[in-house]
Image: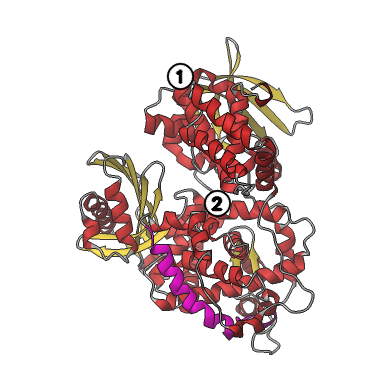
Amino acid sequence: MIADDVFDFSKEFHEGIRAEAHAFEAFREEVFVEKMGSILEEYGEIESLVPCPYKGRGMKIDGYHYDDEFKDFTLIVSHYLDEDDPAKARVPNEDLNSLLKNATNFLIRSLKDLHNKIDISNEAHELASLIQECKGEIRTAKIVLITDGIAKKRPADTEEIEGIEIIYTIWDIERTCHYHRTGEREKITIEFADYCGGPLPCVIRKNETDHYSTYLGFMPGVALADMYTKWGIKMLDMNVRVFLSARGNVNKGMRETILKEPDMFCAYNNGITVFARSVEVTPIETGFGLVRAEDFQIVNGGQTTASLYHTRKKNRAFIENIFVQMKLTVIHNPEDVPILVPKISEYSNTQNKVQMADLAANQSPHPEIQNISNNILAPDPTGGAQQTYWFYERSRGSYDEVRNLTAKTDAQRKQYDLLRPKNQKFDKIKFGKVWNTYLKLPYLVSMGAQKNFGRFNEWLREQKEEDWVSFFKKTVGLLVLWNSMEKIVRRQGFEGYHHNIISYTLAWLFHLTNSQIDIEKIWQKQVVGDPIINVLEPMAHVVNKHIRDTLLNVTEYCKKEECWNKLKEKDYSLSTNIQGEYITGNRTSEYKPNISSETEAIEFCKNKGEQAWFTLSKWLKERNFLTGKARSQCYFMGRYLHQDKEPSVALSIPCKKAWEESEIRGWNYVNE
């Protein structure tokens, strides 16, 4: 039987898709795929989605995620019925199997020469080319079927084809509804005997106020890698989201240690910090042992876990002698969990200070901005008296929750929708996109929703002196500008890469105008002036051509600062008419995009001096310490400083890290 909330959710979900498709002149299935992509990103099924609708004989694909480092692919195939009533949208098993087979066919044929049969302007051509280039290196591929219908419940299936383990999973409207309503991920229960051969020896410390209990132990590296094999990045997720550095990336220093000095891993590594809802312990010969942990989630140490898994998988590393310090905390009062866990995560994260970014939207200034959004009416764009609110959906589903709680009758719901139209709802992901675009960081926006928001959130929390009312109005102005740009891009008929084109074009506009576009004027009018619209369309065509002018994968190229720097070098003149849209008077638009950790890294490197970096590079090479890339980065830092050049953030962060990791290995420049 289909639950009532699924009927309600399906109706709202489809209404939202139709409204968005109409507003942005897009196909409904296209909007459905993008919406589901956001849900899959947040859940942890994928890191980011690249839409690429393609249908061929016996083939269908709608999107993908590609891990450049490990050559792993996640393929998305859509089955969109456009039916509000779930009872009328049941999907037969044979249809599900056929769709999964279509996606599998795309994968297998891409291993051969499918890319030669797809138009080069289609993003599916790029996907097929990537798969063909990675032939022989792909060990795992995941195929995710998304549908707005009801599918028969079945576990994830796996099969091996041409040496590739293919994992199949299905997201239907019931599963989407459950996750959207509750935010609950799959609960991870760890039976330590399954991974450690028995209870994990531990030391127990109970807090005197009885708020929490802490369990200290040493987890076998093999156990952590095996857990990650089964659960993936879902074991790194709390409702606060994962730190940027924990999104499955491998730390190069850790890999080096795993491969060359495995016996030193425990000494060099800070260990992992874990939260669990409850644990079971048992007396053992040496004291106590952990038997089971319910809702096991790593809140710090994602890189450690992922590095063990990937280095074993990719480099065939022997990790049987590696042990990792684990601190596991159980919070006794469930109401304290959303307060204490983000703090545990933040305060314990000293392993990678440069990249630490608390992705929780329940910390300042997000609550203040949400309160402002609930209390400030936006002007009527027609000049009339129909003012409305822009709703900041700080937490998932809060728009619908507030609507259900405050609007009980049809008349009240109609009034609510008039005051808070759905097209004026924005979440933290779009919040981060528009601001990092304004800060002229389009390559960060291109890195994916979570990574982009993490970097933006770290910057946001450092804006201590900001007037948040003014900031909210600027945010709305940027949202209006982004939405207008989205319509422009969709009308051009570009083959894919829409969000990259939007972000790069707007960032380029801010660069060419020295950020003088009057964003608060856009807030006042709630529309973008014609002089701005008129310059954006031709700029979008230049950007579309620019991002494709590369031998690299276009999606990966857009993530590189090099792509942005080359765009800025273009000789391009704006119409003088746009100057009427500039800021007037004494107001300023100056926002510095750097965050303190980035500034600290640059200053750290400059203060060491050029000779120190040349010497460090030589010292590392003589001892074969760290990676060749790290040694080269230290050398290039010396060259930059010798030429009196300002080192970039992208170079300074790894160089600072290399210096710190070298000190652990005995580097002392004073004694050299």
Residue carrying label 1: 197
Q: How does the figure colour the protein chain or chains?
A: secondary structure
Q: Dot 2, how many residues are within 10 Å of its Cα: few (below 14), some (14-19), or many (20+)?
A: many
Which image quarter: residue 53?
bottom left
Please name the residue shown 31% across and 42% down the image: 138
Q: Is residue 409 above or below residue 642?
A: below
Residue 541 magenta: yes
Q: Is residue 229 above or below residue 264?
A: below
Residue 172 position, x and y percent, is: 40, 58
Q: Is residue 319 above or below residue 567?
A: above
Q: CA distance from mark 2 to mark 1?
A: 37 Å
Mark 1: which amino acid?
Answer: Gly
> Can you see residue 251?
no
Residue found at the very far top of the displayed protein: 285
Residue found at the very far front of the displayed protein: 643
> Which image quadrant: the N terminus?
bottom left
Q: Nearer the viewer, residue 486 or 366?
A: 486
Q: Which residues are magenta?
A: 524-550
| SS at badge 1 | loop
Mark in front: 2 vs 1: 2
Please name the residue shown 50% across and 36% down the image: 632
Mark 2 and mark 1 in contact? Answer it, CB < 8 Å: no
Residue 93 position, x and y percent, is: 28, 55
Which image quarter: residue 668?
top right
> Which image quadrant: the C terminus?
top right
**First-in-chain label (2 vs 1):** 1
Number of marks drawn: 2
Residue carrying label 2: 451
Mark 2: which amino acid?
Answer: Lys
Residue 537 magenta: yes
Q: Is residue 370 left or right of residue 138?
A: right
